[in-house]
Amino acid sequence: MAIERTLSIIKPDAVAKNVIGDIIRRFEENGLEVIGTRMTHLSAAEAGRFYAVHAGRPFYNDLCAFMSSGPVLAMVLEGKNAVLLNRQLMGATNPKEAEAGTIRAEHADTIDANAVHGSDSAENAAIEIAFFFGDLDLHSRL
Ligand code: CMP
């Protein structure tokens, strides 16, 4: 299994619920290492740039409004199979479909307020990591 990096965002709903620690605990207990973190409050335009791949989809404006409604915690996770492992730990995008025990089943309320974002491929992870972080911000312990 390849060592990968992936981008995780703890979204405004989960930050407001004060469950940052619970979410990071799940990553660490499953073998992922946090190698960079940044708390920020995105503007609607920044959220729009981050989610540009979804521009034009019916949910795009609501998504950008939600993602700029409060602070988020962006972080880079590193470990074996990090992209897929993070997605398994998050659960399905729609919390109503998320498997019991996953982050979204535990902490998400709606498809927009779904607690966390995770990159969907190693290729997109590299693009999404570069959106928030420079090389000097990342601290691998491999
Ligand atoms: P995320 O993993 O951050 O990627 C895009 C986000 O758009 C997704 O999580 C959801 O929060 C949001 N979204 C809202 N409606 C939909 C939809 N119908 N399909 C996919 N994503 C949606």
Image: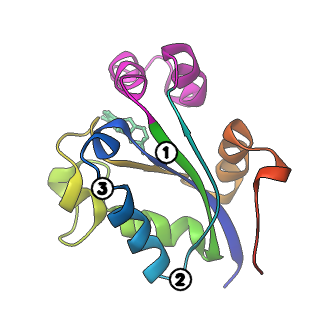
Q: In the rendered structure, which disc, 2 or 3, sits on the residue that comes first in sequence?
A: 3
| Secondary structure, magenta segment, majority class | helix
Identify which residue is drawn at 17% across, 44% down: 109
- Percent position (x, y) of residue 44? 48, 15
Residue 66 drawn above or below residue 101: above
Q: In the rendered structure, which disc, 3 or 1, sits on the residue that comes first in sequence?
A: 3
Residue 114 at least partly seen: no
**Residue 52 magenta:** yes
Q: Which residues are magenta?
A: 42-71
Answer left or right for 125 relative to 106: right
Kind of residue sitting beneath label 3: Val
Kind of residue sitting beneath label 2: Gly
Residue with the mark numbered 2: 31
Tell me, for residue 73, which label it has, or none.
1
Residue with the mark numbered 3: 19
Residue 94 drawn above or below residue 88: above
Identify which residue is drawn at 54% across, 54% down: 120
Identify which residue is drawn at 49% across, 45% down: 73
Q: Quadrant of ligand 1?
A: top left
